[in-house]
């Protein structure tokens, strides 16, 4: 799992609950798809995830009181339970405030769909 050593530094700037939630998300994402490349984007204040085939699929955005897991093509992802937020044409967000809210099965399912979709869009 290629992780970015700057991620811990970025998360150290946040309250403990936010940092712990982001760390839990990092673990879930990289365990579900170990091929993902993790890269900190200081300008965006995010930890981004890129698949070798699908390209950029998602990013963790820590904020003052929560963590947003943003899916690049989230508007196209199946979301029968309405867990994703957002109204834009492309991205959708999963908002989390505690590590306990990070449901590994839910995150992995969204990630599976995001990687599959990204690969399909890039193969056109």
Image: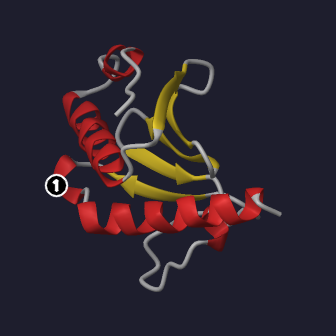
Residue in the image at 65% along x and 68% along y: 75
Q: Residue at x 38, y 22 (%)?
A: 7
Instruction: Quarter of the image for the N terminus: give it.
Output: top left
| In the image, residue 27 above or below residue 92 | above
Report which quarter residue 20 is drawn in. Answer: top left
Residue 112 on image: x %, y %: 45, 65
The answer to whether residue 120 is above or below residue 3 is below
Lateral position of residue 83 relative to residue 30, left or right: right
Foreground: 11 or 122?
A: 122
Instruction: Give the residue number, with chain letter if any, for mark 1.
Output: 100
Within 10 Å of disc 1 (Cα), the crowding (few <14, some 14-19, many 20+) is few
* Residue 66, x across and y down, in percent: 36, 43
The residue at the point 32 percent across, 40 percent down is: 26
Q: Is residue 109 above or below residue 44?
A: below
Asked if residue 118 lies left or right of residue 24, the reply is right
- x%, y% of residue 23? 26, 36
Say how many tags the image has: 1
Toward the bottom, the furthest residue is: 80
Q: Position of residue 108 (x, y in %)?
A: 35, 62
- Up-down: is 16 above or below 91? above
- Where disc 1 sits, the SS reads helix
Farthest right residue in view:
124
What coloring was used for the rendering? secondary structure
Location of the C terminus by quadrant is bottom right
Q: Report the residue at 55% width, 62% height from top.
A: 114
Q: Nearer the viewer, residue 39 or 75?
A: 39
Location of residue 8 by image quarter: top left
């Amino acid at each position: 799992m290629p992780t970015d050593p700057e991620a811990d530094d970025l998360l150290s700037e946040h309250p403990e609950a936010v940092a712990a939630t982001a760390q839990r998300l990092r673990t879930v994402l990289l365990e579900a798809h170990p091929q993902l490349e993790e890269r900190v984007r200081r300008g965006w204040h995010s930890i981004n995830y890129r698949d070798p085939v699908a390209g950029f699929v998602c990013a963790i955005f820590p904020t003052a009181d929560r963590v947003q897991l943003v899916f690049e093509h989230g508007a196209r992802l199946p979301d029968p339970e309405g867990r994703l937020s957002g109204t834009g044409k492309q991205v959708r967000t999963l908002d989390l405030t505690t590590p306990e809210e990070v449901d590994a099965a839910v995150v992995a399912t969204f990630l599976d769909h995001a990687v599959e979709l990204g690969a399909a869009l890039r193969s056109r």
